[in-house]
Image (spheres, rainbow, N blue to C red):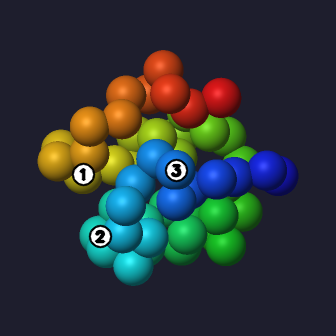
Amino acid sequence: MNIQLGQVISDVAGETGLKIIRAILGGERDGQALAKLKNGHIRASAADTP
């Protein structure tokens, strides 16, 4: 799994980053499913997710 989370969100220790990291540790591998975890303040769209 090749994820460059730092290029999509600026604070990986923030709410969205932690949700995504927890989901990955829980076994989630689908990029679109991970993108749905983003907070409304994140500017990156789901289209920015491979």
Residue that extends furthest to the right in the rendered view of this protein: 1
Q: Which residue is at a point 24% across and 51% down the rendered structure image?
A: 39
Q: Find disc 2 in the rendering and name its residue.
A: 15
Asked if residue 19 shows in the view, the reply is: no
Answer above or below: position of 24 versus 8. Answer: below
Q: Find disc 1 in the rendering and name its residue.
A: 39
Task: Answer few, some or many: residues within 10 Å of disc 2's Cα (few below 14, many 20 plus, some between 14 and 19).
Answer: few
Element carrying mark 1:
loop
Please give the label number shown on residue 23. Answer: none
| Kind of residue at badge 1 | Asn
| Kind of residue at badge 3 | Gln
| Kind of residue at badge 2 | Glu
Residue that extends furthest to the top in the rendered view of this protein: 47
Task: Answer few, some or many: residues within 10 Å of disc 3's Cα (few below 14, many 20 plus, some between 14 and 19).
Answer: few
Report whether 32 appears left or right of 39.
right
Image coordinates of residue 11 in percent, x first then y, are 36, 69
Q: Earlier in the sequence, mark 3 or mark 2?
A: 3
Q: Which residue is at a point 55% across and 69% down the rendered structure image?
A: 21
- Distance, label 1 to label 3, CA atoms, is 16 Å
Image coordinates of residue 33 in percent, x first then y, are 53, 40
Answer above or below: position of 10 versus 32. Answer: below
Please tell me how many numbered marks the rendered image carries. 3
Asked if residue 16 shows in the view, the reply is: yes
Q: Are marks 2 and 1 in contact (CB under 8 Å)?
A: yes
- Distance, label 3 to label 2, CA atoms, is 16 Å
- Distance, label 2 to label 1, CA atoms, is 7 Å
Q: Earlier in the sequence, mark 1 or mark 3?
A: 3
Q: Which residue is at a point 18% across and 44% down the rendered structure image?
A: 40
